[in-house]
Image: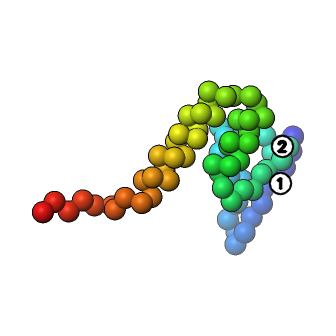
Amino acid sequence: MGFKPIKYNSKGLKMQKAIVSPDFNNKTVLVRNHWDYVEMWLQKEKKSEALMYWKQAESFFNASQSIPDRSDLQ
């Protein structure tokens, strides 16, 4: 498969995908919430155990957002 490099201001641009070997023929999905996207994919693939851990990870992440960055011991 031949392609012509894309350039901007004389610099080459590269496609960014979160996979090791990108298949540029596949559709790219733009999402606002990666938690929802992965949850829908896991449901579609019937990965119930992985879905349970994904939801748990989301809960831990959300809980971590409300704790302060540092602890002041007095």
Q: Residue at x 78, y 40 (%)?
A: 23
Q: Distance between the residues labelled 1 and 2?
A: 18 Å
State the residue in front, 10 or 16. Answer: 16
Above or below, 46 against 27 in this view is above
Judged from this view, the residue extending furthest toward the left is 74
* Residue 25 picture quarter: top right
Q: In this view, does 6 lie to the left or right of 48?
A: right
Q: Alpha-carbon neighbours of circle 1 within 10 Å: few (<14), some, or many (≥20)?
A: few
- Which element is circle 2 on? loop
Q: Earlier in the sequence, mark 1 or mark 2?
A: 1
Q: Which residue is drawn at 24% across and 59% down?
A: 71
Amino acid carrying mark 1 in the image: Lys
Above or below, 56 against 49 in this view is below
Q: Which residue is drawn at 58% across and 38% down?
A: 54
Q: Quadrant of the N terminus?
A: top right
Return the residue at label 2. Answer: 26
Q: Position of residue 60 (x, y in %)?
A: 47, 46
Q: Alpha-carbon neighbours of circle 2 within 10 Å: few (<14), some, or many (≥20)?
A: few
State the residue in front, 18 or 40. Answer: 40
Amino acid carrying mark 2 in the image: Asn
Return the residue at label 1. Answer: 4
Above or below, 14 against 26 in this view is below
Can residue 57 be seen here? The reply is yes
Q: Residue 62 carries which label?
A: none
Q: Position of residue 6 (x, y in %)?
A: 77, 60
Q: Position of residue 74 (x, y in %)?
A: 12, 63
- Which element is circle 1 on? loop
